[in-house]
Image: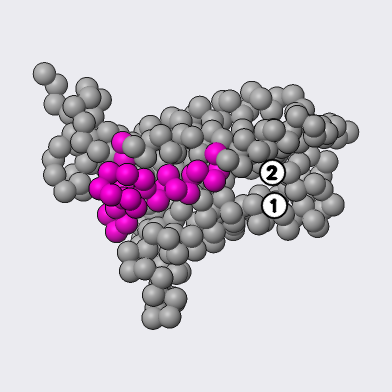
């Protein structure tokens, strides 16, 4: 009988003098790179009536939204010391090298950036978000791969043949590689579905609604086999509802509402 695979990677990809470059940071850079390339590909095919420079502004503001929103949201809802840092140690917010990012906060940051950029460029907010939505799963998948390399956010103990051992866990039990589940569902599956759906012009709200519904559903499901954040645990009882599930439920509801709205919404024509 084969032994379970031990996930024991060096989180540092390489070192430049005193500077250590981590795999997780590289995953973010790769994500932004592929989003920029595919975003320009979609723009050239008329999916958003803006110039290349304007698209560059959108991607830059979106990148800032991911970092700022993800960090602030984590500090508000996941930080081990609670929200007392606001008064006692506000500079901890900027210690991103200690880790701590939240997808839901990053999503809100992207939405805020998209709203501001859309107003400046006289575009409907959801035409912008429909354009961006198929690109986001690339970053999600690469981020989960970074979590796997770091050996963090592991799953519950399992006797499945593909269960793996994470040395950072409090035991040596084989566990669900929940990071890979999320990489596959939130990254690969979501990208393929949204990309194929958006190959042709679609009614407003449809692509955004599909993104929200798929992410919310996938995240809610994987949380059943993923160990909750130790500083939070389960919100109700000992095995019931995690913070990730609570924050994914609104996404599922919003996705359903947007899909319903898309049935009577106009379709943005291709730009010349």
| The C terminus - image quarter | top right
Residue 12 lies within the magenta run: no
| The N terminus - image quarter | top left
Q: Residue at x 18, y 34 (%)?
A: 174
Q: Residue at x 40, y 74 (%)?
A: 85
Query: Could you say where residue 74 lies in the image, as x and y percent from the top left?
Result: 44, 59
The count of marks equals 2
Nearer the observer, 52 or 177:
177
Query: Could you say where residue 27 lies in the image, as x and y percent from the top left?
Result: 45, 44
Q: Residue at x 38, y 32 (%)?
A: 181
Q: Residue at x 76, y 41 (%)?
A: 127
Query: Could you say where residue 78 lies in the image, as x and y percent from the top left?
Result: 39, 59
Residue at numbered disc 1 = 114
**Taking 61 as reference, is 122 left or right?**
right
**Taking 229 as reference, is 259 left or right?**
right
Q: Is the Cβ of the residue at disc 1 closer than 8 Å to that at disc 2?
A: yes
Choose top left, top right, bottom left or bottom right for residue 203.
top right
- What span is in magenta? 225-252
Vertical relation: 198 (above or below) 103: above
Q: Earlier in the sequence, mark 1 or mark 2?
A: 1
Label 2 CA crowd tier, 10 Å (few <14, some 14–19, many 20+): many
Nearer the observer, 87 or 242:
242
- Asked whether residue 16 is in view, the answer is no
Real-space CA distance between mark 1 and mark 2, rounded to the nearest whole angstrom: 7 Å
Residue at numbered disc 2 = 129
Query: Could you say where residue 67 lies in the image, as x and y percent from the top left?
Result: 53, 57
């Amino acid at each position: 009988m084969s032994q379970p695979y031990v996930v024991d990677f060096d989180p540092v990809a390489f070192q430049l003098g005193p500077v250590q470059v981590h795999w997780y940071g590289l995953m973010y850079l790769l994500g932004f790179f592929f989003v920029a390339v595919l975003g320009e590909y979609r723009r050239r095919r008329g999916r958003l009536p803006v110039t290349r420079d304007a698209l560059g502004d959108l991607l830059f503001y979106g990148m800032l939204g991911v970092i700022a929103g993800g960090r602030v949201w984590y500090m508000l809802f996941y930080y081990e010391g609670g929200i007392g840092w606001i008064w006692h140690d506000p500079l901890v917010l900027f210690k991103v090298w200690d880790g701590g990012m939240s997808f839901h906060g990053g999503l809100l940051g992207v939405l805020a950036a998209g709203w501001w950029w859309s107003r400046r460029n006289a575009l409907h907010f959801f035409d912008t978000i429909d354009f961006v939505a198929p690109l986001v799963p690339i970053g999600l998948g690469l981020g989960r791969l970074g979590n796997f390399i770091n050996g963090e956010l592991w799953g519950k103990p399992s006797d499945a043949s593909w269960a793996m051992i994470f040395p950072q866990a409090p035991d040596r039990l084989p566990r669900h590689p929940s990071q890979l589940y999320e990489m596959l569902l939130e990254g690969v599956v979501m990208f393929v579905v949204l990309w194929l759906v958006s190959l042709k012009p679609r009614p407003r709200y449809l692509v955004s609604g599909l993104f929200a519904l798929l992410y919310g559903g996938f995240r809610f499901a994987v949380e059943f086999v993923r160990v909750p954040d130790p500083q939070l645990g389960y919100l109700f009882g000992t095995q019931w509802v995690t913070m990730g599930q609570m924050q994914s439920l609104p996404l599922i509801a919003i996705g359903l509402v947007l899909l319903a709205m898309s049935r009577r919404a106009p379709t943005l024509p291709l730009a010349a």
